[in-house]
Amino acid sequence: MLENQKFDVIIIGGSYAGLSAAMSLGRSLRKVLIIDSGLPCNKQTPHSHNFITQDGETPNNIAKKAREQVLKYDTITLLDAVAVKGVKAENNFLITTDKNEIFEGKKIIFATGIKDHFPSIENFSDCWGISVIHCPYCHGYEVAYKKTAILANGEKAMHIASLVNNLTKDLTILTNGEKKFTDEQLSKLIKHNIPIIEKEITEIIHENGSIKNIIYKDNTSMSFEVMYAPLSFSQNSNIPNLLGCELDEQGYIKTNDLQQTTVKGIWACGDNTKSMRSVANAVASGNLTGAMVNKELIDEEF
């Protein structure tokens, strides 16, 4: 049990965005509690890319170094727990953890990430982040020129195909069912020699997360080396919803340019607020969020 349960700021989620926000606040001598379960969404991704000074580093090493640096600020506390409930009190917020501890914070930052919804394809999760990937900017260079599948349909498939077409010409769209493209989109795919396979997928054959073959429902198969899969998602935490934070039409927590949510006193940053999922973007949004939260505390105090 922590001796003092009151904090200037409670940050729910202690991955890259949450740690970055905490550093901004710690450097302003704010008393901060980070509540984190230690289960980042990229836990099995072998390397992080497109983050200057950290390109090629493992996500775990980046996070470990970040925690060590952040916790050097003695006003910051990291708690290994899961936040399960949040309520608005008169001038603050009360956050309850799965260990039945209750903490009071003047301000709240949600850096809770999102939960990906995997399709019903055997072994899909074993390959996620390794050879089944979501972002050409994070992973595309490393898999350039390889035999590549896009598991998507319609506009999502077109978006990924336009990005990946610059990285490989051996590209196939797997719709996992009936295709849903306009005539204009089909013409564009034909122009770029990108075939469409409408067969339902049942299984991925892999070796330590590296794709070897895709198995279809009719028992036929195709070999691929990499697959892009833009997935549907939901918020990783229900507490923003319980506190009244609005979501946008895509399902992200709605924030303004300063990372403020629609509820006064609550901010959000990282993957739960925008589609650009990368360590670099998470760190940037967390850095801004910490500064803006500190600014509001200053305005209330000075």
Image (spheres, rainbow, N blue to C red):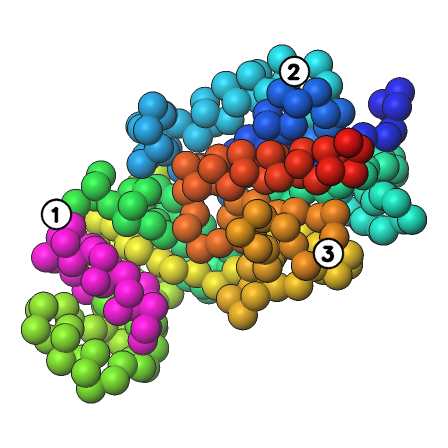
**Residue closer to the observer: 22 or 297:** 297
Q: Residue furthest front?
A: 302
The three-letter amino acid code for the residue at tag 2 is Tyr
Q: Which residue is mark 3?
A: 263
Query: On the image, numbered disc 1 is attached to which residue?
Result: 145
- Nearest to N terminus: mark 1 or mark 2: 2
Residue 150 colored magenta?
Answer: yes
Q: Is residue 290 left or right of residue 274?
A: right
Residue 66 location in percent, x, y?
Answer: 52, 22
Q: Position of residue 227 (x, y in %)?
A: 28, 54
Asked which secondary structure carries label 2, the reply is: loop
> What's the CA distance linking mark 3 and mark 2?
28 Å
Marks 3 and 1: in contact by CB < 8 Å? no
Region of the chain picked out in magenta, as a range: 146-172
Q: Are marks 3 and 2 in contact (CB under 8 Å)?
A: no
Badge 1 amino acid: Tyr
Q: Quadrant of residue 130?
A: top left
The quarter in which the C terminus is drawn is top right
Category of crowding for the residue at label 3, using alpha-carbon neighbours closer than 10 angstroms: few (below 14), some (14–19), many (at least 20): some
Q: Amino acid at mark 3?
A: Val
**Residue in the image at 62% along x and 13% along y:** 72
Frontmost residue, 84 versus 242:
242
- Using the image, tell me which numbered label, if any, was put on residue 73: 2
